Amino acid sequence: QVQLVESGGGLVQPGGSLRLSCAASGFTFSNYAMSWYRQAPGKERELVATITSTGSSRNYAESVKGRFTISRDIAKNTVYLQMNSLKPEDTAVYYCNLWRSSRDYWGQGTQVTVSS
């Protein structure tokens, strides 16, 4: 079955960087677009970034453009989110997402906290 396992979250100071990873299994990774979402306390889950199946196209939320980069490694069945110039408002649980067969699949999430 589909499994998405996120890692790489943690506590970082404002202006710092983190790289999140999402290891995928149970489906043909190279055939599907992948996304990262986040959910801050008391807020709705929001789309952060999406990468197409081949990696040829990427889209970002306005709030993270120029600071975050989504990428994928087909050989490792892994999608990444490189986060630079982090701000306190980036604090959230970050989720890896797959849309397949008319439904969403989610990982367990990884906490990112940006604080001094």
Image (cartoon, grey):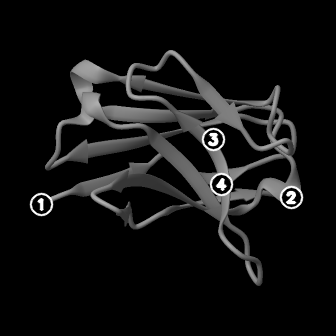
Estimate how packed mark 4 is, as few (under 14), some (14 to 19) or many (20 or more) residues with alpha carbons within 10 Å: some
Q: Nearer the viewer, residue 95 or 97?
A: 97
Q: Secondary structure at mark 1?
A: loop
Q: Which residue is mark 3?
A: 49
Task: Look at label 4 and name its amino acid.
Answer: Leu
Quarter of the image containing the C terminus? bottom right
Name the residue at the front extreme: 102
Q: Is residue 6 left or right of residue 87?
A: left
Mark 3 to mark 1: distance in Å?
A: 24 Å
Of the two numbered discs 1 and 2 on the same chain, state the one appearing first in sequence. 1
Q: Secondary structure at mark 2?
A: helix
- The answer to whether residue 11 shows anywhere in this view is yes
- Nearer the observer: mark 2 or 3; the answer is 3
Q: Which residue is mark 2?
A: 89
- Nearer the observer: mark 4 or 2; the answer is 4
Mark 1 to mark 2: distance in Å?
A: 34 Å
Q: Secondary structure at mark 3?
A: strand
Of the two numbered discs 4 and 1 on the same chain, state the one appearing first in sequence. 1
Location of residue 64 with respect to 52 vertically, above or below = below
Of the two numbered discs 4 and 2 on the same chain, state the one appearing first in sequence. 4
Q: Which residue is mark 4?
A: 47
Task: Look at label 2 and name its amino acid.
Answer: Glu
Q: Which residue is mark 1?
A: 1
Name the residue at the bottom extreme: 42
Q: Residue 110's spot in the image, x, y percent? A: 51, 60
Q: Residue 79's spot in the image, x, y percent? A: 41, 34
Q: Nearer the viewer, residue 92 or 63?
A: 63
Quarter of the image containing the N terminus? bottom left
Disc number for residue 66:
none
Q: Residue 71's spot in the image, x, y percent? A: 50, 25
Q: Secondary structure at mark 4?
A: strand
